[in-house]
Image: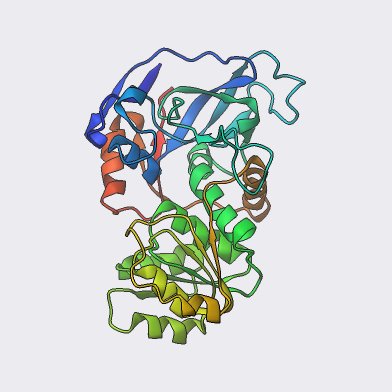
Amino acid sequence: MKAIVLHELNGPDSLSYEDWPEPEPDTGEVLVKLKAAALNRRDVFVTQGQYPGAKPDALPVIPGSDGSGELVAIGDEVEGVIEGTPPVNSDVVIHPSLYWGDDLRIPGKDYRILGLPENGTYAQYVKVPAENVFRKPAHLLHEEAAALPLAALTAYRALVTRGGIQEGDTVLIPGIGGGVATFLVQLATALGGRVFVTSSSDEKIEAAKRDLGAEGGVNYGSDGWQKELRSMSGGIDLSVDSIGGDVFDALATLANPAGRIVTFGATRGPVPNLVLPKIFLKQLDVLGTAMGSAQEFEEMLKLYEDRGLKPKIDSSYPLEETATAQKRMDAGENFGKIVLNVPE
């Protein structure tokens, strides 16, 4: 089969499009013939050696966590044993959280994400545990379904399981543009939130309002943006943050009493000069989250199907141009998900 393989940790240019042995499903596994895959920032970090487990002794590896395609083969002890596994020749989407475990609150000790150390979805075929494939929502094309897994699951858990979003909540998504952020806006709007965004790009703010249902937004490069946002929103009930740094203190400032701040990333690094009384005097909840369980993945897919939602696609690239696609993501040029079309 054809696959994108990472041989060195020198960034996207270390990715090679080459022949690779087609995998065979082991006991409890299934084989998926991929139609489309999608990028996450995790994939870029892996190529740069900036992700846990991304070390020379883990290479070579096929990256990629997101994928949609056709279930073409099953291993032993799958059919009739693992309840809910779709039948062979059905269209499926892959849940990238491997071995989450039975505790919905936290992943177990064997938990990891597809694409490192296991070979991932930047290939014509991938094998995964049978419990990690779900029927593709019928209204979605394969490239749309492939855009969902990691980012939409992260967004769903952050908003619903951890953030406890309620209809009418004012919701702030800082740094609109990337895959998870666009899902956060789309899902929060669908669940009845009044959604506001920030960005350094006026164009991305307008796109969030036009395409995703955001009520408003401000450019955080402008003076007094926090006051402008408070005036616009009336204060924030729920913020979902992937930025960290000095943004986190701003979220505490903007929070309404008994508000919630959910964090799943820190692209700006540690939080400096956090004024702690903002948290304890306002009775704020600060919650961490990452990825999600199979139950949450199924709930997320059902929400997309019931509401007829479709993910925001930024651009599509053929599989052999994965390095170019990753460079677009690394430069922050995308608004929505970047998808890879897998050749027949």
Position of 117 with respect to 319 (left or right) is right
- In the depicted structure, whether residue 17 falls above or below residue 166: above
- Residue 311 coordinates in the image, percent (x, y): 50, 51
Residue 138 appears in the picture as rendered: no
Q: Position of residue 325 (x, y in %)?
A: 30, 41
Residue 189 in sight here: yes
Q: Quadrant of residue 129?
A: top right
Q: Residue at x 60, y 21 (%)?
A: 30
Relative to 334, residue 232 above or below: below
Question: Which image quarter is the C terminus in?
Answer: top left
Q: Where's residue 109, x and y in %?
A: 57, 35
Structure colour scheme:
rainbow
Q: Residue 279: give x, y in percent of width and height.
A: 51, 75
Q: Is residue 217 left or right of residue 139?
A: left
Q: Is residue 229 above or below residue 303?
A: below
Report the front residue among 139 and 47: 47
- Residue at image location 55% in from the left, 80% down from the top: 282
- Looking at the image, residue 234 lies above or below residue 128: below
Q: Quadrant of residue 250?
A: bottom left
**Image quadrant in which the N terminus is located:** top left
- The answer to which of 44 and 245 lies nearer the viewer is 245
Q: In terms of depth relative to the viewer, which is nearer, 64 or 290?
A: 290
